[in-house]
Amino acid sequence: MTGRTGPAARTLRATGVTKVFPSPEGPITALDGVDLTLDPGEFVSVLGPSGCGKSTMLAILAGLDTPTKGQVMVGERAVTEPLLEAGVMFQRDLLLEWRTCEDNILLQFQMRGLPTAPYRERARELLEMVGLTRFARRFPRELSGGMRQRVALCRALVHRPPLLLMDEPFGALDALTRESLNVELGELAARTQTSVLFVTHGIDEAAFLADRVVVMSPRPGRIAGEVRVDLPRPRSMAVREEPEFVARTGRLRRMLAEREQGTVADV
């Protein structure tokens, strides 16, 4: 893709992914025959009730867990280990409290045995993009929750990944901060031409960010349907008041209501 200096973006594809966990009461099927595709440059939200296996699916796509059945491919290669060409974000920012923001961003290079010096300018560039330039040498305890998640986003993007996998990264934030980060993420993904898979249980958030929203059924998680959100970009929060947006979120609510049969803790 134009302007990309990292690895080339490739299609991420899950085929027939099933995940069964053992338990004292017997096997628990978290995912059952999931087929999912993320094309280069596409932003896909995954929406579903708590306990439907969204987090399990993302971990398998990232190579952090293995399916009981089925396969995940990136391009022509099977994903059988952590996907180093992906950036991954979780609901918790997982910042190390004794490292500065800049050094937290650069941590993954140290973990890979790479020198950090060549990447410091990239870390500062990302901090500038999310409005945190003057906090580069601050420690996580000096930041708000939203600022900490911005640093975590910079860490996920510092190696210029073509793919970003996000597991409810803004779920613990207040509504205004969450909306602000939604706008920033949409702009950042478009600017860097990053493919994004975004797991959430927020209907408006899913539709605001995505080109396509995939809806999962209650456990065992299956792909129950999808809704395309072919609204112009860049999107501001004002788009949520437009009739086209309201129609799509209404459709998503109906799809979830038809399938949800109660909630349990996330697998």
Image (spheres, rainbow, N blue to C red):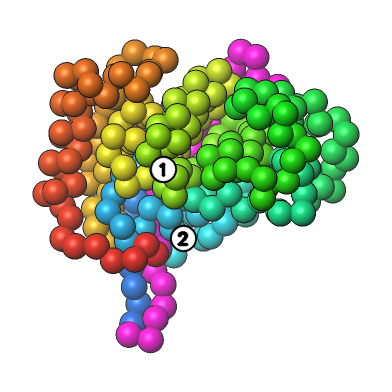
Residue 7 shows in the view: no
Which amino acid type corresponds to the residue marked 2 in the rendered image? Pro
Vertical comparison of 195 with 89: above or below: above
Identify the image quadrant of the C terminus: bottom left
Identify which residue is drawn at 48% across, 45% down. Answer: 169
Nearest to the observer: residue 196 or residue 173: 173
Residue position marked by numbered label 1 in the rendering? 174
| Image spot of residue 128 (x, y percent) | 67, 23
Q: Is residue 246 left or right of residue 160?
A: left
Which of the 4 image quarters holds residue 154?
A: top right
| Image spot of residue 108 (x, y percent) | 74, 46
Q: Earlier in the sequence, mark 1 or mark 2?
A: 2
Residue position marked by numbered label 2 in the rendering? 67
Magenta stretch, overall SS: loop
Which amino acid type corresponds to the residue marked 1 in the rendered image? Asp
Instruction: For mark 2, give the secondary structure.
Output: loop
Which of the 4 image quarters holds residue 122?
A: top right
Identify the residue at the far bottom of this view: 24
Identify which residue is drawn at 37% across, 39% down. Answer: 175
Which residues are drawn in magenta?
A: 1-25
Q: Is residue 57 left or right of residue 33?
A: right
Q: Is residue 144 rendered magenta in the image?
A: no
Nearest to the observer: residue 135 or residue 161: 135
